[in-house]
Amino acid sequence: GLDLIRATEAAAFKSGRWMGLGEPAEADRVAACAMHDALATIEMDGRIAIGEEESLAQNGTLCSEEAVGTGRGAQVDVVVDPIDGSRLLAQGHPGAISVVAVSPRGTMWAPRAPALYMEKIVVGADVANALVPECMDAPAAWTLALVARVKHKRVSDLVVFVLDRPRHADLIEEIRRAGARAMLRPDGDIAGALMASSPDSGVDILMGVGRIPEGLLAACAVKATGGAMLGRLAPQSTEERDAVRAAGLDDREVLTCDQLVSSNMIFFAATGIPDGPLLSGVHYIGDRCRSNSMILRGETRTRRLIYAEHLLEE
């Protein structure tokens, strides 16, 4: 876990310099390179289970099936997001984080292109046993009523994390008509899943469609905290759906957290880049900087928060 934190810290230190500069692609590039170099020093025989070829392929790093680590040690699947919320970071908004997760080799669900997006619902441990696959096809009001009943709340007390994207216009309207409150963010659904699965975040549930790598990272975090998640492929056009089905992928199957990540031997690490609701960001002070990170361990459901001060080598 501490080794993984060094990888997320490295990405955060480099990309934090780009906060508010309006260049998300360049922030992504420097974060990916820093994370790649840090992962190469970790004693593991790692393989990127599913990469972010769309956004990172131009860097030639952190793509699907790439080997990471020293090649010695445990054989593990690795999934990464050097910046979850690069647009937030570029615009100077709070909440972007750097993220890595690992689990034993072959335990991560990893559909390849043309599958790009997945629909997901995330709740915390207090609602985990009540989340059923039927929630994926039920009206939002039905699912929210279920969550409210288990939490002993009114629906009007619920806060729902949703990415603020055109594809969610109908979902947002459903949530508001049900009486719940929508927390809309333009980016950062891994952070949203962490908030939905954390008992003290003020977020009760995450709903909506996001990219598959972020969904897999969310599943690692949710399982490590004892929460629950449902996921399903969500093609965003008729052409994409036809391509997904032609590739032999089932866009109707609802997957649970145990199917998304089949092992409890999960390590999940995240470091704040700017300040956010979960973690403080990187603060630069002359030749030093301060960071705030989180490690989740699935076997013990331990959550460790780390505050550190570093000598910069720039």
Image: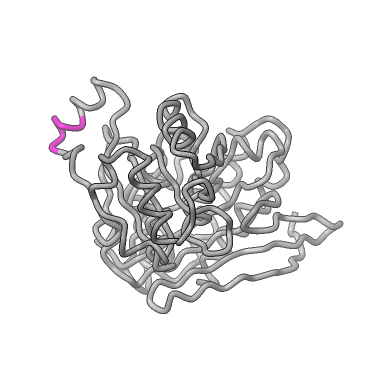
Q: In this view, does 152 lie to the left or right of 142?
A: right
> x%, y% of residue 101?
43, 60
Between 96 and 227, the one nearer to me in the picture:
227
Q: Residue furthest right?
A: 286
Quick check: 238 above or below 114? above
Which quadrant holds residue 116? top left
Magenta-colored segment: predominant secondary structure: helix
Quick check: 98 above or below 161? below
Which quadrant holds residue 93? top right
Identified at 32% across, 50% down, the residue is 65
Q: How many marks?
A: 0
Between 117 and 176, the one nearer to me in the picture:
176
Residue 250, magenta (yes or no): no
Image quadrant where one finds the C terminus: bottom right
| Colouring used for the render | one colour
Identified at 40% across, 39% down, the residue is 208
Q: Is residue 134 left or right of residue 162?
A: left
Which quadrant holds residue 301? bottom left
Q: Is residue 279 left or right of residue 100?
A: right
> x%, y% of residue 311?
77, 65
Quick check: 125 above or below 184? below
Identified at 31% across, 56% down, the residue is 131
> x%, y% of residue 306?
64, 70
Identified at 65% across, 58% down, the residue is 279
> x%, y% of residue 178?
44, 38
Q: Residue furthest bottom?
A: 300
| Residue extent of the magenta highlight | 244-248
